[in-house]
């Protein structure tokens, strides 16, 4: 039996973030969403503090994908796709 696959949804902010990514990072994001997050969303780093309940996966040295899992709908909601450390 194949693992359950989650549907991916992006917030408006995440859509804006994706539009600002380079073509290479867009391709990497697509692969991470399709082959990692949609298959096993809990594999991301569990965040703490005011982001408790959210997860992150590194996209590049500066950028991370931040998301939350909505198990009841079998959805992963991507909140940010281009977070900047140090800004």
Image: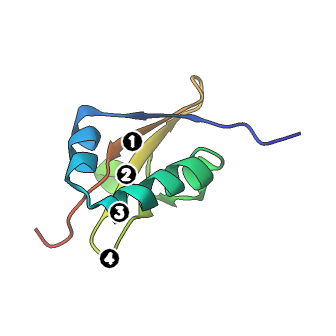
Q: CA distance from mark 3 to mark 2?
A: 15 Å
Residue that mark 2 sits on: 66
Q: Along the polypeptide, which appears first: circle 1 or circle 3?
A: 3
Q: Is residue 39 visible?
A: yes
Disc 1/disc 3 C-alpha distance (Å): 16 Å
Q: Are marks 3 and 4 in contact (CB under 8 Å)?
A: no
Can you give x and y, in whole percent of width and height, for residue 40 in the image? Answer: 64, 50
Q: Earlier in the sequence, mark 3 or mark 4?
A: 3
Q: Distance between the Cα atoms at labels 2 and 4?
A: 14 Å
Which residue position is annotated with label 3?
A: 25
* Contact between labelled residues 2 and 1, with CB atoms less than 8 Å apart: yes
Q: Nearer the viewer, residue 84 or 31?
A: 31
Q: Which residue is mark 4?
A: 61
Q: Residue 56, can we see it? A: no
**Direction bottom: furthest residue:** 61
Instruction: Please tell me whether residue 57 is drawn above or below residue 5 in the rendered image.
Output: below
């Amino acid at each position: 039996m194949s693992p359950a696959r989650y549907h991916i949804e992006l917030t408006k902010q995440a859509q804006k973030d994706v539009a600002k990514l380079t073509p290479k990072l867009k391709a990497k994001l697509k692969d991470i969403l399709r082959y990692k997050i949609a298959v096993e969303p809990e594999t991301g780093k569990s965040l703490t503090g005011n982001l408790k309940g959210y997860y992150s996966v590194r996209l590049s040295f500066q950028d991370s994908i931040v998301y939350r899992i909505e198990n009841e709908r079998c959805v992963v909601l991507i909140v940010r796709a281009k977070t900047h450390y140090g800004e």
